[in-house]
Image: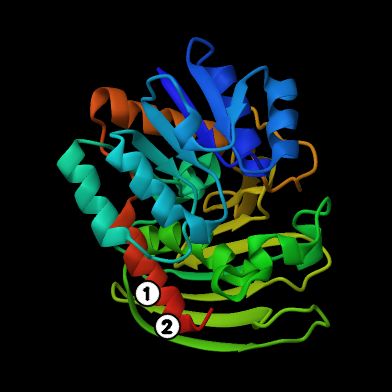
Amino acid sequence: MNIVVIGLGSMGKRRIRLVKEMYPDYSVIGIDGREDRRIEAAEKFNINTFPSMEEIDQKIDCAFVCTSPLSHASIIKDCLERKWHVFTELNLVDTGYTQNMQTAKNNGCVLFLSSTFFYREEIKYLRSKITKDKNWNYIYHIGQYLSDWHPWENYKDFFIGEKRTNGCREIMAIELPWLIATFGSVEKSNVVSDKITGLNIGFDDNYMIQLIHKDGSKGAIIVDVVSPVAVRKLEVYAEGSYFSWNGTPESMYEFDSISKKLIPVMITEQSEHMEGYCSFVVENAYKNEIREFFDVVLYGKNSLYGFEQDQEILNLIDVLGA
């Protein structure tokens, strides 16, 4: 299997490292317009790198699109027209969705969209416990100061600092897919947002959101790029049931109806972390979704999330004003 990773920033480097660890027999090359990134990736991973697709002189089977979101649509189009299977990071805008889905279908290509939280062991456990015979409430706060997301670069040079792909929008695009899949489609929403930091940004930096789901569950979500402490705090409860999670594998607790106490949920998978990221960022989930992508390509497995569902999520985010 010959793989090309397009975009050699932090996420591109993560995908290269994981693919090489998981599939050492696969050939990996990199593409990036920046020479410094090409040099760094070539030295770090012992791979060939190129400034553009046109310079590749070998057969390619799959592409990982890891560039900034606003560039995804045209790159995905180019890959699909070459009949490459595509794994893409979050797009955050739905530009080219209809055309690229049709091209993928016409050319027999897999078009796979990252949605990493579907592959978190804690989320998989929680979803297995959310039964349809109860109406559930949840309270969820996700936030981190924008400058701390990538402390090695200025947030103005990173897509999270741009209005169309801002940090709050990205958080929603990460979290809403699994929340909607778990609690059902949204019937009604309310939102309050404003800007309370001195960050040099042209978008609101915090959102307080209420979601009413058609099945009767409801949630209160706080999303921000304000909190100086990276935070992910979730409470989910219904009659006789309660779960709490602080974003790490060891921080999930469940109410035990016999002892009337909170007991830790044992996640058996050993968690892995990447240097430079907060403890909430667990490498295992990235591995799991890469494995899922190749299972879809090689064995025809149905993916957990796709462009059709993402278009609905992006429409909801637009309604919420992010």
Q: Quadrant of residue 203?
A: bottom right
Q: Nearer the viewer, residue 283 or 202?
A: 202
The answer to whether 316 appears left or right of 82 in the picture is: right
- Image quadrant holding the C terminus, namely bottom right
Identify the residue shown where x is 60% and y is 40%: 32
Q: Front-most of 46 and 274? A: 46
Q: Tag 1's secondary structure?
A: helix
Given residues 158 and 208, the one toward you in this image is: 158
Q: Toward which corner of the image does residue 145 lie, by quadrant?
A: bottom right
Q: Identify residue for label 1.
A: 315
In screen coordinates, is 106 left or right of 312?
Answer: left
Q: Residue furthest front?
A: 55
Q: Residues within 10 Å of mark 2 (few under 14, many from 20)?
A: few
| Residue at 25% over, 57% down | 99
Residue that label 2 marks: 319
- Element at label 2: helix
